[in-house]
Image: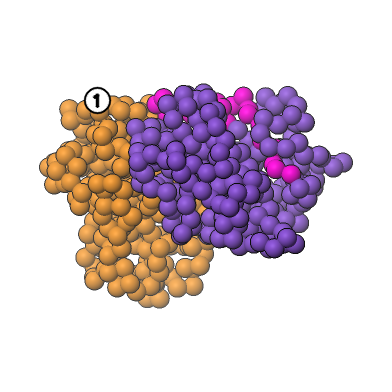
Chain colours: A purple, B orange
Amino acid sequence: MSLTSTPADLGPREAREHFRSGADVHTAGWAPGRTQANLISVPADWAYEVLLFCQRNPKPCPVLDVTDAGAWTTPLAPGADLRTDIPRYRVWKDGELAAEPSEVTGLWRSDLVSFLIGCSFTFEAELAAAGVPVRHVDQGRNVPMYVTDRACRVAGRLHGPMVVSMRPVPAELVDRARQVTGLLPAVHGAPVHAGDPADLGIGDLGRPDFGDRVGLHPGDVPVFWACGVTPQAAVMASRPPFAITHAPGRMFVTDVPDAHYRVG
Amino acid sequence: MSLTSTPADLGPREAREHFRSGADVHTAGWAPGRTQANLISVPADWAYEVLLFCQRNPKPCPVLDVTDAGAWTTPLAPGADLRTDIPRYRVWKDGELAAEPSEVTGLWRSDLVSFLIGCSFTFEAELAAAGVPVRHVDQGRNVPMYVTDRACRVAGRLHGPMVVSMRPVPAELVDRARQVTGLLPAVHGAPVHAGDPADLGIGDLGRPDFGDRVGLHPGDVPVFWACGVTPQAAVMASRPPFAITHAPGRMFVTDVPDAHYRVG
């Protein structure tokens, strides 16, 4: 990458190479129009419960791919390595955050099943194309994410609250944002809520649980989408012995154009 | 049910009561506008592979609900009994059809996990409302279904071909049929093919593998949708020791309005 290039100049493969070589950045605005994904890798004896959790909670957990045990490749990005190509990882032991490394090759296990779950960064290029401003990208920040008071449907040992991402949207464009994103259920689809954060049990928009604080412009409404950090919250609540996830906002960038997942 | 009532007069609960009391009929045209579902029940040690097979083959296998082991209830139809409320079942042993009973209460096992998978009968009311004729309903027949030469993505021990249903559609209405059904991915979504059956490896439209032969009108094009009998074909190919499914075309009628699954 040249010193003058911006994330939007790079294709998904170049973006992954950049992260693999150590760049620790959030991926909002990178490789626009390409599908971005959340990662959660668990031991095989937890895989059914993760997959069932995703099936029972499709808004926060739309599954894009599931690997075979031990594999670190995915058809969503040929040539990519799930152990190295995410800017930052989180390693969980018994539900506690144990480390935040830039790659996890040495921690990989032959029994790890990896789930790639759609991320709302994917639809931001479509929002922008439809004339909906994307404030956190304009402000050069990660999207703010919040743990809500809404419980996910339980799947065996897995339980936890829904996590949401928030984007400020001018009031007159909320319907357009709903329409644009509603056609992309694989990356969380339409918002789960627009308006009062208290309706989701969020006390202070200025203190997100993950990501960055983002400023609202006059006339903006906070709009909330289900977020793929939800499985991470389930790991914290349910305490499997071991798990690896991406760090919030530092996603796996796939080769798949977002239009591939557009419905209708 | 009175002797003069027709399927379209009945709500989903009344339809299930009718089937529970022994009526052996296909469910095309019953409880129009309510979501119909395919059933596959397998021992718990096959459940992950079935769920993964569905995730990897979402067009034929859109999962609407997964029960806990042993359960015969579903939130999709409160009060329903999955062991009795389908007009006819199929019981499989080592991949061979062992019986076709009208209820399976005596065969139920505490380790059975049941999957309810969307059925294209669901969108027929919307097709009709959009002015697209539904020939098999007009002709009082079950929809014709065909085993194709397209292999599903493998999931562990589970493999098999994609099965499709076919509806003849006037050529000038094929795009409209595509649009209407494309918004309902939970019940198979847009067609996988329109036109030459040979492109799917189907030799003779007059000899469906399941269901009834349905006549094309002059100017009709055969349009093919992915079908929820696909997991049954996987059972035949992959030979789990035990499985229970619905009989093709004899579906589980849920309470859920089809609009619940409409995207966008």
Residue A165 vertical position relative to residue A15 in the rendered view, above or below: above
The residue nearer to you, when weighing A189 against A108, is A108
Is A21 displayed left or right of A172 in the figure?
left
Please state, as top left, top right, bottom left or bottom right, where the N terminus of chain B lies in the image: top left
Residue B226 vertical position relative to residue A97 in the rendered view, above or below: below
Q: Amino acid at mark 1?
A: Ser
Asked if residue A23 lies in the magenta stretch, the reply is no
Asked if residue A153 lies in the magenta stretch, the reply is yes
Name the residue beneath numbered marker 1: B110
Is B208 displayed left or right of B195 in the figure?
left
**Farthest residue, direction bottom:** B219
**Where in the figure is residue A40, as x and y percent of width and height?**
48, 39
The residue nearer to you, when weighing A229 against A110, is A110
Residue found 72% across the figure and 37% down from its top: A212
Residue found 67% across the figure and 24% down from its top: A201
The residue nearer to you, when weighing B59 against B120, is B59
**Farthest residue, direction right:** A218
**Where in the figure is residue B86, as x and y percent of width and height?**
28, 38
Residue found 19% across the figure and 42% down from its top: B240
Q: Quadrant of residue A203?
A: top right
**Where in the figure is residue A72, as x and y percent of width and height?**
42, 49
Q: Which stretch is magenta?
A: A141-162
Q: Secondary structure at mark 1?
A: loop
